[in-house]
Image: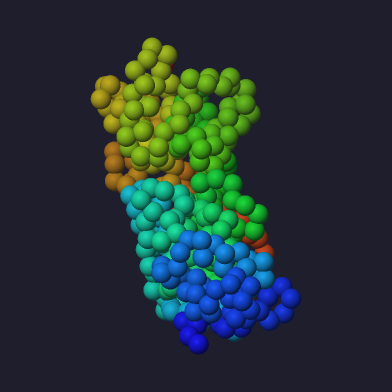
């Protein structure tokens, strides 16, 4: 009776739960249950749902002795590879994985924030030590499928509030927005604009909240027309930069919610004949390597991307060993890096 790598007997809510018992309750064969557990595609959606329902009700889990016994692989999943900081995330994961002699499987979701079932079936067949999601999240049923196979997962820099119990690693986005805006205020700027990421992304809102808090702290009125939501890419920074700067009462400083958007702002300023930092101060976010290559070198908020990825990798490997993390949500500190793109405002 083949069970293709999944224990025929496992721990459950009421003691030992066998695949045979699950099959009997679901009204299917033992090989069918095995196929569902191993992510085989040759099972109908209705049958899969029926078996998954019984697995959840019986609290099936592989025996602890089998956890971490899968192939030496970690799955690293991006919503899209053209993220400005994907390479730093990959480097952080590889740094920890190499110490444990683990390979890393890269996947992209084509811009989606939730994986397709076909992708999840492939992961269930591979049975990696763990999965790290970058700006991605899972449906409750998908989380359950990973949990019942004892495949731990961690989310890096969430795109929204994660449900309770989901291990997450991010950064102090509110503090980063606060530090960037305080810096511009300390230079004497009072008309400060912000271009963050998409409005439905948690880190975008947190950075704008930090911006608002700094202005309120300084007694500077908040002008809603100076608050923009972009896309974290150069195009968004350029579009909103043109809109903000091509007006009579233009801002003297712009805080861009990503370094790539800051590059777009610099291009918009150049196209309008403005000089940075003489006519406009610009602050970015992330501290990507490109910030030191451009002129003027960009003042930015350093987000510890490699350490975020390394922390997530250590966390998922600890979960694979059966360890319980002290905190399920870890936010690493950000730091303002002052360079040449900011200066006191010149009088007009």
In the rendered view, tell whether residue 2 sits above or below residue 58: below
According to the image, what is the colour scheme of the structure?
rainbow
225 left or right of 167 in image? left
- Occupied quadrant, residue 243: top left
Residue 35: give x, y in percent of width and height: 47, 74
Q: Is residue 311 visible to us here? A: no
Residue at image position (68%, 75%) is: 12
In the rendered view, tell whether residue 123 sits above or below residue 343: below
- Occupied quadrant, residue 13: bottom right
* Residue found at the very far right of the displayed protein: 14
Q: Nearer the viewer, residue 13 or 314?
A: 13
In the rendered view, tell whether residue 82 sits above or below residue 210: below
Residue at image position (53%, 19%) is: 223
Q: Nearer the viewer, residue 230 or 295?
A: 230
Residue 292: give x, y in percent of width and height: 33, 46
Residue at image position (54%, 42%) is: 202
* Residue found at the very far front of the displayed protein: 27
Is the C terminus in the top left, top right, bottom left or bottom right quadrant?
top left
Q: Is residue 117 visible to us here? A: yes
Q: Nearer the viewer, residue 32 or 234?
A: 32
Residue at image position (39%, 54%) is: 109
- Occupied quadrant, residue 247: top left
């Amino acid at each position: 009776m083949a069970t293709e790598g999944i224990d025929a007997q496992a721990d459950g809510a009421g003691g030992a739960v066998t695949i045979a018992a699950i099959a009997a309750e679901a009204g299917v064969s033992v090989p069918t249950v095995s196929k569902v557990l191993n992510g085989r595609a040759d099972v109908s959606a209705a049958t899969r749902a029926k078996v998954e329902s019984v697995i959840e009700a019986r609290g099936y889990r592989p025996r602890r002795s089998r956890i971490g016994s899968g192939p030496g692989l970690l799955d690293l999943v991006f919503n899209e590879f053209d993220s400005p900081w994907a390479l730093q995330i990959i480097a952080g994961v590889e740094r920890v994985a190499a110490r444990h002699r683990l390979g890393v499987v890269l996947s992209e979701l084509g811009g989606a924030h939730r994986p397709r079932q076909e992708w999840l079936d492939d992961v269930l067949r591979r049975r990696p030590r763990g999965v790290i999601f970058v700006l991605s999240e899972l449906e409750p049923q998908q989380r359950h499928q990973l949990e019942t196979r004892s495949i731990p997962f961690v989310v890096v820099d969430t795109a929204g509030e994660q449900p309770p119990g989901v291990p997450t690693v991010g950064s102090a986005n509110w503090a980063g927005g606060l530090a960037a805006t305080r810096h511009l205020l300390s230079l004497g700027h009072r008309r400060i604009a912000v271009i963050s990421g998409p409005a439905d992304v948690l880190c975008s809102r947190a950075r704008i909240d930090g911006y608002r808090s700094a202005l309120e702290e300084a007694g500077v009125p908040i002008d809603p027309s100076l608050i923009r939501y972009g896309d974290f890419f150069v195009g968004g920074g350029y579009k909103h930069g043109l809109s903000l700067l091509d007006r009579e009462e233009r801002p003297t400083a712009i805080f861009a919610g990503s370094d790539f958007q800051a590059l777009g702002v610099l291009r918009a300023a150049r196209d309008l004949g403005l000089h940075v930092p003489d006519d406009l101060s610009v602050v970015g976010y992330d501290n990507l390597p490109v910030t030191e290559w451009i002129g003027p070198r960009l003042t930015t908020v350093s987000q510890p991307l490699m350490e975020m990825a390394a922390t997530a990798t250590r966390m998922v490997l600890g979960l694979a060993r059966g360890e319980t993390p002290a905190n399920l949500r870890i936010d690493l500190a950000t730091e303002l890096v002052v360079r040449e793109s900011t200066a006191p405002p010149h009088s007009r």
